[in-house]
Amino acid sequence: MTSTTAQPADLESFSAELTGLEIITDPAQLTKLSQDYYTFSPILQPLLNDKRGDVVVRPTTEAEVIQAVTACVKWRLPLTVRGAGTGNYGQCVPLQGGVILDLSKMQAVKWVKPGIACVEPGVKLAALDKETRGSGWEIRMLPSTYRTATIGGFIGGGSGGIGSITYGQIRDRGNLLAVRVVTVEDEPRVIELRGDDVYKVAHAYGTNGIITELEIPLAPAYAWAEAIVAFPDFMTAARFGQVFSDSDGIIKKLVCICADPIPTYFAAFRNVIPVGSHCALVLVAESSLEPFAALVNEYNGTICLQKSAQEASKGSTLVEYSWNHTTLHARSVDPSLTYLQTMFPSDKELKLVERMYQHFGDEVMMHLEFIRMGGEAIPAALQIVRYTTPERLAEIIRYHEDHGAFIANPHTFVLEDGGRKTVDVEQLRFKERVDPYGLLNPGKMRAWAERK
Amino acid sequence: MTSTTAQPADLESFSAELTGLEIITDPAQLTKLSQDYYTFSPILQPLLNDKRGDVVVRPTTEAEVIQAVTACVKWRLPLTVRGAGTGNYGQCVPLQGGVILDLSKMQAVKWVKPGIACVEPGVKLAALDKETRGSGWEIRMLPSTYRTATIGGFIGGGSGGIGSITYGQIRDRGNLLAVRVVTVEDEPRVIELRGDDVYKVAHAYGTNGIITELEIPLAPAYAWAEAIVAFPDFMTAARFGQVFSDSDGIIKKLVCICADPIPTYFAAFRNVIPVGSHCALVLVAESSLEPFAALVNEYNGTICLQKSAQEASKGSTLVEYSWNHTTLHARSVDPSLTYLQTMFPSDKELKLVERMYQHFGDEVMMHLEFIRMGGEAIPAALQIVRYTTPERLAEIIRYHEDHGAFIANPHTFVLEDGGRKTVDVEQLRFKERVDPYGLLNPGKMRAWAERK
């Protein structure tokens, strides 16, 4: 592995070559732009707390990216790419200092065709959605941080989100059409990856190329109504979530199930969700509200909040109570809380969900997010965990794995130790081609460190 | 059961009360308007061949429907409702003569909102699609007869079709929002059914109410490209169909798999599909063509025909080679052929499909149509059968059922003996309310004949 600790003199020389580019060296800003939301993890907190880049460069064009990369390579500086820093695994925290390449100013929407948009990586998801809605389209899936998160950051470090109940995850063929990548070589090249090749750089934490343009597929933009449905017992809420997800005739975008006491962390809904209830937070097409109500009725749920798409477009939306915003709200009440990421196996009876729910009780509060995986709706989960010790957290994870749940560990910044579990040989080979000096986000790809 | 044989005098009195309505008594027309495509079945052919209505009435408004119904009830005439007569089970063949109520002139599209259309029953599906496409919507699912079939006939006697791979079947909650029904009483009433109540009359062959208006959900209208993919062996083609259906990131509308020698019946594709090939006929969104090609590549398929949406909109489309049009083309070459309707169980490995394929060989030529059922893509099938005797056909059906396939028998005109298998108590109760004299399509609902 190439040693990559930046020397002050090199940094100065580097900066001197970036005439015309925005450069940030203000310490407070540097600290801020070296962080993401890894603070959700008590394991990552001490590991990443003191990690800082030495300089932030904010290019506005691909040409400026190439200019910055050329200088980085010349002075052999570590180079960590960053979007809005809304990730949770320290993906964009520079472990070895060096240069932070902040792409949030590359915000061009190059074109929008029916079903496809071509964008620069710094476009905020909310802004892109707003732009494509004009022609009847929207992004297929979004993280709960969509207001600030960038498309490049989402593709580089995310997996799925609101919309995944219909379209699956980013990793599923068809959910990313093309990427343009700048290599980190003495003479940087621009490579276009299309088809299955896009997965050489998707979800690679920016370790093997700098994404400067993306073609992403769009979804038809429905008018999304929002609803909170309360249930007296958790398993009824969970089964409602499964059946709703499996209702092919009802168009939906979010099926989030929160066990009591999670709803008590939602200050805004304190007078909305009955005390002691388990609830479903859903986005459903307005044109499907009538059959949706029939389904709620079948499961004896109580719709305690319903907003039209028009109403939901003002102020905060239920999106910002789902996925990892659920964790955010819980932590804003009790910062000692943390979370897990789990894929439960496909099972209409949700037996393993029920078993884990009963086994852990309040220690691991059940929060399901239904998503499609290989054509089937399964409960993913971002359980909220009452954290005590690293050992106990490891034990909780092991218990899940021993019983057949897949844990995408959010308490590691190493690519292969999170959701992937194995080395992605294609990603490694691609890194060898485009980042021969190992400058990109050093320390994140285990396969690179351990190769040969 | 009320006896319902029309007397000539009653018919004359009946007709005399229909001033202003279109009435048809021309024998050739009467014969034509007493038929559907039950001729696909060698079992139904002799049973229905001589069945004819005595008079056809063609109302253009709900008021005219009520006028006709009032007269029918007065003279106790059997009343059989008809759309375009594109069904295959003799649904609209009048077993006891009497009046045929042809609703094909009630063609108003009352309104189209985002995601919902309100229509009269006689609207042709192709015409409705054309009208809604202007605002970016289309019908969720279509039979292969969409050019001539009416929406009322489809809801009254159909189950699903092209589009069911995304939205499931008509019976799935959300795929029919409301129906307006005229009752057959001394003083006919108009009843609106919404929510789950719509299933009291959907797929009831017009035995329990006359549908005069429907609210149906719409789907976003993609630009649908068409492709034929050839495979050297059937099970690879079938597995491709399953995986394509399960590819949540690739937008599709049709996944039809035809085993050799079925493609040889497609005269138009004689020089397109390689001899001896098994093929997939698909509709895929233009914006998904690139990932689709990657999937085809993974399964070593050969795209032997591909048309853009623009090209596909001219002339015949692959839709008209799928579902029961497959049977139509086969029978146009060899009229002794017939077919089956099968639901194979959910199984990604398609073991039962493979077993049946190998067991029957050419006698039961495999034709799969993937559809969504309860959130999962399963292979439905409309196998083409080399017919020999009724006994052998029954044996083939029994063999399928004994091995766990569900047969929706297309060789019966009795509602409960086809796809339903059991009495639908809700439909029976509704018939008791709206058709006390049992005039509607007599002989089709077994539960009515056998009640008490």
Image (spheres, coloured by chain):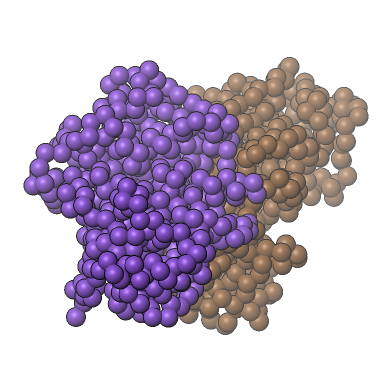
Chain colours: A brown, B purple
Q: How many marks?
A: 0
In this rendering, would A68 be left or right of A332? right
Residue B204: x %, y % from top left: 34, 64
Of the pair B295 and A203, the residue shown nearer to us: B295
Residue located at (35% from left, 49% from top): B29
Residue located at (67% from left, 34% from top): A214
Residue B207 appears in the figure:
no
Q: Is residue A416 above or below residue B23?
A: above
In this rendering, would B446 be left or right of B378? left
Q: In this view, does B244 lie above or below B116?
A: above
Residue B255: x %, y % from top left: 40, 39
Residue A261: x %, y % from top left: 55, 75
Residue located at (52% from left, 50% from top): B139
Q: In which quarter of the image is residue B368?
A: top left
Q: In which quarter of the image is residue A54?
A: top right
Residue located at (42% from left, 71% from top): B17
In this rendering, would A131 be left or right of A22? left
Of the pair A273 and B43, the residue shown nearer to us: B43
Q: In which quarter of the image is residue B438?
A: bottom left
Of the pair B243 and B183, the residue shown nearer to us: B183
Q: Is residue A77 above or below residue A176?
A: above
Residue B40 appears in the figure:
yes
In this rendering, would A349 be left or right of A331? left
The quarter in which the C terminus of chain B is drawn is bottom left
The quarter in which the N terminus of chain B is drawn is bottom left
Residue B282: x %, y % from top left: 43, 35
Of the pair B34 and A383, the residue shown nearer to us: B34
